[in-house]
């Protein structure tokens, strides 16, 4: 295994490799960070959520604090990038990228049978310990959320997304859904990663 910084190649490195967040200088495995690259033409910062774009990259925690710090101080990227760095709208761009990936993740999870929909089915799956977290529609009723959380183990995350009930159901190929239970299975790995990022970005 190559030592950190020993390679300048842009080929994807093994998962689990540790990177340093350019905003807070904290270290984390690369899956827990988001990669930024510099646009070759205009020097602007591009969000490389899949960490596959060529060129020099910089890594940042997917948290509001770290992303907003870079937007306010783009010079934090100048060690990783060449020349002048501009990062207007970076925080919004990161949110947009994560949101798009989250929507893809919902479709993938639905196709792989990793989601549970419908109040009774969710409550039953919660009782059986089959659900790791809940996704909530933007217009889910407070009472619905309370009912589900009452059936859930203490501290279960319930993550609101920007889709309303109609859009959330349509996204997963079903009737309108106020909530979805997410099973800890292979088909929901991508979704769960994006939900963690979404929560961090506030
Ligand atoms: Zn950070």
Image (spheres, rainbow, N blue to C red):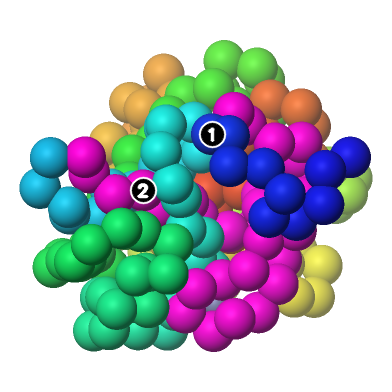
Rendered view: 155 above or below 141: below
Q: Where residue 128 appears, x then y in whole percent?
A: 89, 45
User: Disc 2 to disc 1, how far (Cα)?
Assistant: 11 Å
Q: Residue at x 53, y 48 (%)?
A: 194
Rendered view: 51 above or below 140: above
Q: Residue at x 44, y 62 (%)?
A: 80
Q: Where residue 182 appears, x then y in whole percent?
A: 66, 42
Residue range (magenta) = 11-40
Image quarter of residue 67: bottom left
Give the camera-side residue of 113 and 16.
Answer: 16
Tell me the number on the disc at residue 10.
1
Q: Is residue 160 left or right of residue 21?
A: left
Element on which disc 1 rests: loop
> Is 24 a magenta residue?
yes
Q: For label 2, count other residues whose C-alpha is less than 10 Å away and answer few (under 14), some (14-19) or many (20+).
A: many
Q: Residue at x 17, y 54 (%)?
A: 44
Q: For label 1, count other residues whose C-alpha is less than 10 Å away and answer few (under 14), some (14-19) or many (20+).
A: few
Quadrant assignment for the C terminus: bottom left
Instruction: Work out whether residue 128 can be spotted.
Output: yes
Instruction: Work out whether residue 115 can be spotted.
Output: no
Q: Is residue 167 left or right of residue 5?
A: left
Rendered view: 74 above or below 14: below
Q: Where residue 12 appears, x then y in whole percent?
A: 62, 31
Q: Residue at x 76, y 36 (%)?
A: 14
Q: Is residue 80 left or right of residue 192?
A: left
Image quarter of residue 157: bottom right
Give the camera-side residue of 187 and 6.
Answer: 6
- Frontmost of labels 2 and 1 is 1
Ligand 1, seen in the image, is in the quarter at bottom right
Residue under label 2, please give it.
37
Element on which disc 2 rests: strand
């Amino acid at each position: 295994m190559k030592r950190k910084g020993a390679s300048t190649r842009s080929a994807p490195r093994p998962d689990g490799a540790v990177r340093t967040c350019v905003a807070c200088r904290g270290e984390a495995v690369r899956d827990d960070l988001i990669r930024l690259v510099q646009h070759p033409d205009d020097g602007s910062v591009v969000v490389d959520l899949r960490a596959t774009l060529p060129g020099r990259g910089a890594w940042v925690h997917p948290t509001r604090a770290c992303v907003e710090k870079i937007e306010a101080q783009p010079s934090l990227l100048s060690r990783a990038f060449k020349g002048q760095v501009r990062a207007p709208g970076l925080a919004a761009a990161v949110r947009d990228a994560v949101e798009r990936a989250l929507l893809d993740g919902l479709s993938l999870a639905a196709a792989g049978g990793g989601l549970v929909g419908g109040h009774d089915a969710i409550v039953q799956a919660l009782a059986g310990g089959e659900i790791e977290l809940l996704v909530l529609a933007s217009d889910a009723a407070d009472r619905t959320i309370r009912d589900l959380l009452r059936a859930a183990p203490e501290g279960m995350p319930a993550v609101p997304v920007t889709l309303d009930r109609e859009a959330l159901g349509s996204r997963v190929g079903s009737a309108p859904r106020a909530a979805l239970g997410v099973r800890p299975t292979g088909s929901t790995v991508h979704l769960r990663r994006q939900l963690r990022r979404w929560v961090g970005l506030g």
